[in-house]
Image (tube, grey):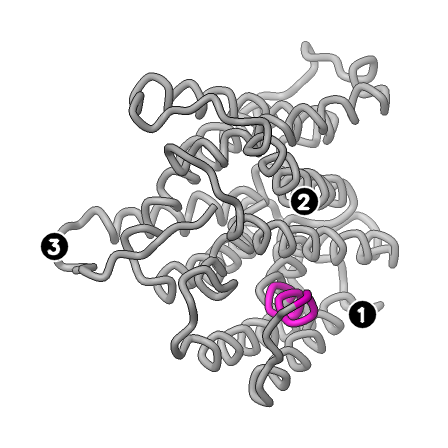
Amino acid sequence: MKTSSSSSFNPRSSCAVPLGFAFMYLAWGATYLGVKFAIVDLPVFLMSGGRFFLAGVLLLAGVALFDRAGFRRGTLREWRDAAAVGLLLLVFGIGTGNWTQQYVSSSFAAMVFSGVPLWIIAIDWLRPGGRAPTRTVAAGLLLGFAGIGLILAPGAGSGGSVQPVHVGISLLLVLASVAWAGGAISSRHVQARGSALLATARQMIVAGAALLLAGVIHGDVARVDLATVRTSAWLGFGYLVVIGSLGGYPVYLWLMRTCPPAKAATIPYVNLLVAVFLGWTLGHETITPRLLVGTAIVLVSVTLVLRARTTSVPADSPDASIALAVAGD
């Protein structure tokens, strides 16, 4: 959904903006580890579906109760658009990424997803009517994809998973990041009336229902025993619902409206650092030097690409919503 940044942004006018960024840095950076804890005892499709469906319903109810002027039931077209974006972002993007975390560490998944801004630029270039990259941007893209290749290369290490990363799992993570990037671009062109949170709530409801259905078809209902679910798994699930979704999305959308896009673009950088740090400390995951080098290359390339494209970019360009691209798992 299209958002606009304020031209009168003054960071010294309030402490709310710095607190908002601090919250986003920590809240979405910790979602990778939250998923890792939750799926130890909760089947991944039911966990992901329940997380999004519950958060979406609560968010929709919150708008209805506290922002009646901005509440709309939504037209069939608005729900259809929300479904399309939600399937890309939350089902094929986050849902697939969550599934792979059964086999890889949270920090490894975060490292692979650090390349999503590069996929956004590449998709925007290849789509009909897209902008061709300059030489600097093209060089940044090549450098970034080389970094992703280094992260995924055999022998790079799985960042603490039980077994070396299988090539199929690596490919699924890449496909998940491409789907997330496509959803981020699509979301910029969705028109919806009322509160900006409505589109997010609809996306989560539709995606949550789809993931729950996938869990039922997969037979997860028969496999789960709620009596044996450990406290750590419930805490991980609760964190994803309350902090990651209910708290994260309203704050994120507010920051996008309040701050210049360049400031919002710092969110994925810090999210990655937080994800890796928490995976190493609380998750006891091993971070190999090769993984760190690959991730550093990706971050340098993203910085290079963004700096080359931030001169006179339109408000609805992919650069303006780059923070959404890697906004947590």
> Mark 2, mark 1: which one is toward the viewer?
2
Element on which disc 3 rests: loop
Of callouts 1 and 3, the N-terminal one? 3
Look at the image and say whether residue 263 sits in the magenta stretch.
no
Measured from the top left, where is residue 183 in percent x and y?
62, 49
Measured from the top left, where is residue 263 in percent x and y?
35, 63
In the displayed structure, 56 sits above or below 308; it is above
Question: Which of these two is toward me, 289 or 107?
Answer: 107
| Residue assigned mark 2 | 88
Q: Distance between the residues labelled 3 and 2?
A: 37 Å
* Residue extending furthest toward the left: 13
Element on which disc 1 rests: loop
Q: Can residue 51 be seen in this view?
A: no
Q: Which residue is drawn at 48% across and 66% down?
A: 319
| Residue assigned mark 1 | 153
In the displayed structure, 303 sits above or below 201; it is below
Give the main secondary structure of the magenta stretch. helix
- The three-letter amino acid code for the residue at tag 2 is Leu
> Mark 3, mark 2: which one is toward the viewer?
2
Q: Residues within 10 Å of mark 3 (few under 14, many from 20)?
A: few
Left or right of 15 in this view: 222: right
* Magenta extent: 119-128
- The three-letter amino acid code for the residue at tag 1 is Ala
- The three-letter amino acid code for the residue at tag 3 is Ser
* Residue extending furthest toward the top: 227
Q: Residue at x 57, y 64 (%)?
A: 117
Place residue 125 in its image quadrant: bottom right
